[in-house]
Image (cartoon, rainbow, N blue to C red):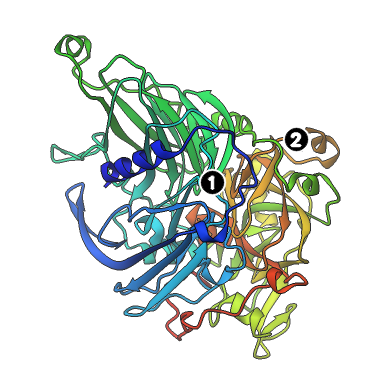
Amino acid sequence: MPEQMVASSMSKMLQTAAGVFFFAVVLSAGDAAVVEQTFVVTQVRMRHLCNDTLATVVNGQFPGPALEATQGDTVVVHVVNKSPHGITIHWHGVKQRLTCWADGAGMVTQCPIQPNTSFTYRFDVGDQVGTLWWHAHVSFLRATLHGIIVIRPKSVAYPFLKPDMDVPVIISEWWQKDLIKVDKNFSVGGSFDDNPAAAAINGKLGDLYNCSGITEDNFALDVEPGKTYLLRLVNAALFSEYYFKVARHKLTVVGSDANYVTPYTTDVVAVAAGETIDVLMVADAPPCQYYMAALANQPPPPDPQIPVFAARAVVRYTSISSRAQHMCGKEPLMPKMPDQHDTITTVYFHGNLTGLPGHPLLPQIRGHVHERLYLTLGKGSICRDRNKTFCKRGGNPESFEVAYINNVSFHLPEKIALLEARYHGKITNGNSSWNGGMPVEDLPSKPPRAFDFTDKALIPSVPGGKLEELEPTRKATMTRRFGYNTTVEVVFQSTATMQSDSNPMHLHGHDFFVLAHGLGNYDAKRDVKSYNLVDPPKKNTVQVPRLGWAAIRFVADNPGAWFMHCHFEFHIAMGMAAVFEVENGPMPETSLPPPPLDLPKCTKQRADVSFI
Ligand code: C2O
């Protein structure tokens, strides 16, 4: 599959003339094409590491089929669900201007597509360009239900050295567990035994893994000396951020989350969960074989440790003369990877990303900020007996652990999707009883109490530690409503309560500008000075550093209900999420149209979405 994609993209790329890149690409409607695809979701048996596993996939493939479009195109995907699970497909990073109904966030924008039914997603890719991806947005099923979205530039060339070929590099995990069960385990308190079996690159586990002497296949990329390759990295893994390197090759970062960045050259790339990074790699090493490797990072102890996950693939120079071959080692050369406990290289990597200056939204971003939110990301607990607020905590079975934003753990609606409830006027604000409506609460602007959020003594290594008194938390469907065209600033604060993890925070329906990040507790007086308001990178996922913070701003200009959550799947299952609701603007062109007629009905067997 990758070879075919490479061939077709190469011809497309050769047609694009070199030129200067402008932000506002005006596309006349007549130019737009319709990209139509059918995704049949089934369960298939796949064999890895001596075990058959039942995987839920699209069109029999892992990773699933690529969605390839050109700027301005309309995408139509018919999803036919032949699996036993309720499914939604989310188009991660697609802004879905006025098409929130097609966003595919389970129980936020739609109820799942029930087994043996289908639903057609329709949306425009607008002026977005670069790499995005699609994935299931119910439960943990996205582990194998995902694929790349490639949006190529229309009438202008890339704002960088023209690549000769285009190569998706999807980093994922291979799970051998029942993912629905894993999801449930996490939504009622987390389970440290639920880990993936391996990491994978483009569905191949690679030769670091073997079972009974049979090594797993490597993904192989054949390169020609002197040619330039655009590697489109996607981190589709559920649990980890990955470091990526190719032995003896420099990588020039040119894009992220379907936005160009100022090119910068490095030998190591960090890809947060949910994030995409586009890099150029010139085949300029001695013509031999090299490994490309992806290694998951994690905080050091006393954080609970998961196994080391690493996958590797091979870069093979073609047309190696026999003389040259002589000079190559027998084995491909392995890059020297960062330490798996290195959590600072990613901070530097992400700090080096800048956007192209001159984005039309920047003046508004620099101007008056209407709403400021300071959101702490952490872990608390809830009494198992729902009528109690007092119970034993700190790991005692009277309570279970949840993740929160500002001390409220997100409760996913169960009967009807939030956007439908809002559309039909069925929302009940406040903590009141059901009343036939969906009870929704306001996401608080600030954490309810201040403490030293990044105090390492809070890392929950021992029961009864400092954390216990901070634990009491509750569950609610938390949303925050923004008027149309509001400028919003969000400062995300990672805390030491959620195992001192980083938090890859993702917002649907909008790109945001990442203005700054730092270590320790955010201090507005000091840290506002570090904001980059000149050329901040534009992203849909921000890696909030471990024991640190990140500040973003965006313009709420897309009406709908947009999920905002951590892209670590166990964090979202445990409740680290909220919904940003954006109100309609004054005109029909600034208002969300009615739902499509075939929007899946909400049935009683509301599929496998995690909820408590
Ligand atoms: Cu990639 Cu809400 O997700």
Task: Specify the label residue 397 is tagged with.
Answer: none
Label 1, residues with CA under 10 Å away: few <14, some 14-19, many ≥20: many
- Residue 188: in sight, yes or no? no
Task: Specify the label residue 258 is tagged with.
Answer: 1
Of residue 23 and residue 406, the one placed in the foreground of this image is 23
Q: Quadrant of residue 80?
A: bottom left
Q: Quadrant of residue 305?
A: top left
**Marks 2 and 1, Cα distance to the nearest angstrom?**
19 Å
Position of 21 with respect to 135 (left or right) is right
Label whose residue precedes the other's in the sequence (2 or 1): 1
Look at 78% across and 72% down and name the residue there. Answer: 586
- Residue 406: in sight, yes or no? yes
Q: Relative to 148, is 561 above or below?
A: below
Measuring from the top left, give residue 55's x and y in whole percent: 28, 60
- Type of amino acid under label 1: Ala
Measuring from the top left, give residue 240's x and y in whole percent: 46, 44
Position of 346 with respect to 280 (left or right) is right
Task: Specify the label residue 534 is tagged with.
Answer: 2
Of residue 497 and residue 308, the one placed in the foreground of this image is 308
Measuring from the top left, give residue 284's x and y in whole percent: 36, 18
